[in-house]
């Protein structure tokens, strides 16, 4: 094998790794962790990406063209407080589950309109917001009082 061939293979391998990393990063801006939505109909495992810093919460799921069926983003706030969300630069419809410090669902907003600048209020103080694909709350049969089990919920 010539040095030119070896160099070419190294460049191709490096590009493949870079593209794979970019795709994974574009799809899930951070590491995914396991979580479970617990409803009257059962336990529904999902994978969540955390948004814990002000910048991560600001960007959220903006500019993503899709979200896998069993994935979501959990927004974790530093304190229990009133929260307002919106869909600015968000390209896919989302369900939002607003939760207290224990992960108990206290407000549900379904099928939030992509690209809307309308404010979506928590309606009461919350610590977490879980964003899922539009229609997921109905698919999982989510009701007020259900909960999210996850190591990301600090009150557990």
Image (cartoon, grey):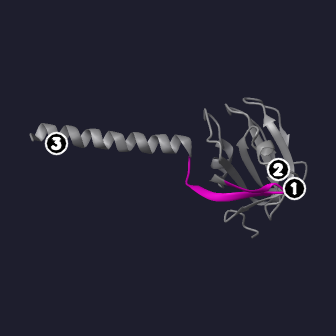
Residue under pointer 2: 142
Residue 76 lies in quadrant: bottom right
In the picture, the disc for residue 13 is none
Q: Depth-wise, is mark 1 or mark 3 nearer the camera?
A: 3
**Residue 39 coordinates in the image, percent (x, y):** 81, 56
Q: Earlier in the sequence, mark 3 or mark 2?
A: 3
Quadrant where the image shows the N terminus: top left
Residue 92 against residue 130 in the figure, above or below: above
Marks 1 and 2, the one that precedes in the sequence: 1
User: Percent x, y for residue 140?
Assistant: 77, 48
Q: Are marks 1 and 2 in contact (CB under 8 Å)?
A: no
Is residue 14 placed above or below 103 in the rendered structure? above
Q: Residue furthest front?
A: 41
Foreground pick, 123 / 42: 42
Please name the residue shown 76% across and 69% down the image: 155
**Is residue 43 magenta-colored?**
yes
Which span of residues is magenta-colored?
29-45
Q: Residue at x 82, y 33 (%)?
A: 118
Report whether 6 appears left or right of 25.
Answer: left
Relative to 115, 32 lies left or right: left
Residues at marks 3 and 2 touching, judged by CB atoms closer than 8 Å: no
Residue 125, label in figure: 1
Q: Main secondary structure of the magenta part?
A: strand
- Looking at the image, is mark 1 or mark 3 earlier in the sequence? 3
């Amino acid at each position: 094998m010539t040095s030119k061939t070896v160099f070419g293979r190294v460049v191709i391998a490096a590009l493949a790794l870079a593209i794979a990393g970019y795709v994974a990063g574009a799809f899930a801006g951070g590491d995914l962790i396991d979580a479970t939505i617990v409803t009257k109909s059962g336990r529904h495992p999902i994978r969540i990406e955390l948004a814990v810093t002000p910048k991560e919460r600001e960007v959220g799921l903006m500019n993503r063209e899709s979200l896998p069926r069993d994935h979501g983003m959990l927004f974790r706030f530093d304190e229990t407080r009133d929260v307002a969300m919106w869909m600015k630069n968000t390209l896919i419809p989302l369900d939002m589950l607003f939760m207290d410090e224990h992960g108990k669902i206290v407000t549900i907003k379904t099928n939030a309109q992509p690209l809307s600048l309308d404010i979506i209020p928590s309606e009461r103080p919350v610590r977490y917001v879980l964003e899922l694909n539009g229609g997921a709350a109905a698919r999982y049969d989510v009701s007020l009082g259900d909960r999210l089990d996850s190591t990301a919920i600090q009150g557990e």
